[in-house]
Image: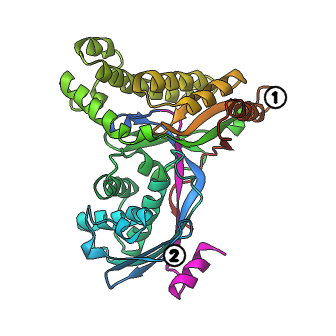
Amino acid sequence: MSVAEEFAGLYGAAPDGVWAAPGRVNLIGEYTDFNDGFVLPLALPHTAVAAVSRRDDGVLRLHSADVPGGIVSLDVAALAPGVAPAAHGADWAAYPAGVAWALREAGHPVGGADVHVASTVPTGAGLSSSAALEVVTAVALDELYGLGLSRPELARLAQHAENAFVGVPCGVMDQMASACAAEGHALFLDTCDLSYRQVPFDLDAVGLRLLVVDTRVKHALGDGAYAERRAGCEAGARALGVRTLRELSYVQLPAALARLTDGTIRRYVRHVVSDNERVRRTIELLDAGEVRAVGPVLTEGHVSLRDDLRVSCAELDLAVSAANAAGALGARMTGGGFGGSAVVLAEASGPRGADEVAAAVEKAFARAGAAAPRIFEAVPSAGARRL
């Protein structure tokens, strides 16, 4: 049964429309977005699909095909941070409800809606299932209420919903990737001003594949660690007299590190500034057609995330080391860390090709007594759209 048919069964009428927004995987540039830095994500074929109809009575009704429970009914005018749908036993509903709240707070005349959503974006894998849910809600409400907002504007509002309503201090990369990505491309995003460029990323044409290794683990150590590192980066910027770490060039990094007395903050600053440089190097390589040379940059980024930012874990390190030992061109953890996923750049075929690399990773996890990872190909896909 389609999402539209499920909607009709729930609400008694066909939806006004059906929209989709993808999850994303980040090729390079981690923990840089909240420092106004550079990132290079791409949209996945996995999407959150929402059937939505406008209501004019101020009632927001939400239902998920993926989460047990009935319809969550909310008063749009009463939505506010701290008054979350969790009180209705539906934590997931905070994401679409937060978008409605953020749109209204920004002065846009959004009333109620009936929403039914189904998602194929893996949850807990660091692939932005929450951003997909926010963005699909945002583009649907934008169209149904004739708001005429740009995709970057909708991404900013979706980010604000997650920051202020849900209470997660994320940067804007996830929402921008979900809203603005293009099929067959990676999104080179400057998170300072939200300017972006679609970078051709046709791996088939050069005989390569990009794999996602979902470790299927999430360690409790990650709870609060993202916020702690964001605070540490902000402290580093203050100590160096800059607004954000984006203002530090890679050339300036050694002198900046020498001025920092706190070892933890020094590590965080080194990672952010060097990862901005890795994004720039990756773009230069892609523009020059040197796609295979991106592999070592990915591995270098993993070492920085592991050693300087310290957000990796045993399973992510195992995925990266096993992939590289089996002949991958490069690999790194992606996302917030402490579990979640890694990306692996590999040859499409041959004795050291993607299938062999994937098999080697699976064997390494089995030998280590770890849960079997979920491995799939990351195909650069389209951003949010009406179906």
Q: Which residue sits at x=24%, y=16%? A: 260
* Picture coordinates of residue 90, whole percent (x, y): 43, 67
Give the secondary structure at mark 1: loop
Q: Residue furthest bottom?
A: 12
How much space separates mark 1 and mark 2, taking CA atoms? 45 Å
Say which quarter of the image contains residue 53. bottom left
| Circle 1 crowding by C-alpha within 10 Å: few under 14, some 14–19, many from 20 | few
Element type where label 2 sits in the image: strand
Res 226 visible: yes
Residue 143: x %, y % from top left = 42, 71
Colouring mode (rainbow / by chain / secondary structure / one colour)? rainbow
Q: Residue at x 63, y 32 (%)?
A: 344
Kindly indicate whether the residue at mark 2 contacts the one at mark 1 (C-beta within 8 angstroms). Answer: no
Q: Which label number is shown at residue 311?
A: none
What residue did someone put label 1 on? 350
- Which sits earlier in the primary sequence, circle 1 or circle 2? 2
**Which residues make up the magenta segment?**
1-28
Reply above or below: 20 against 33: below
- What residue is shown with label 2? 17
Q: Amino acid at mark 2?
A: Gly
Which quadrant, please, contains the N terminus? bottom right
Give the residue drawn at x 47%, y 63%: 136
In the picture shown, does residue 221 fall above or below 383?
A: above
Q: Is 102 in front, or is 108?
A: 102
Q: Nearer the viewer, residue 46 or 279?
A: 46
Residue 26 lies in magenta, yes or no? yes
The picture places residue 252, in percent across and down from the top left corner, at 30, 15
Tell whether position 230 is magenta.
no
Answer whether residue 138 is visible to the viewer in this image: no
Tell me the amino acid under the disc marked 1. Answer: Gly
> The C terminus lies in which quarter of the figure?
bottom right
User: Relative to residue 111, is residue 182 drawn left or right?
Assistant: right
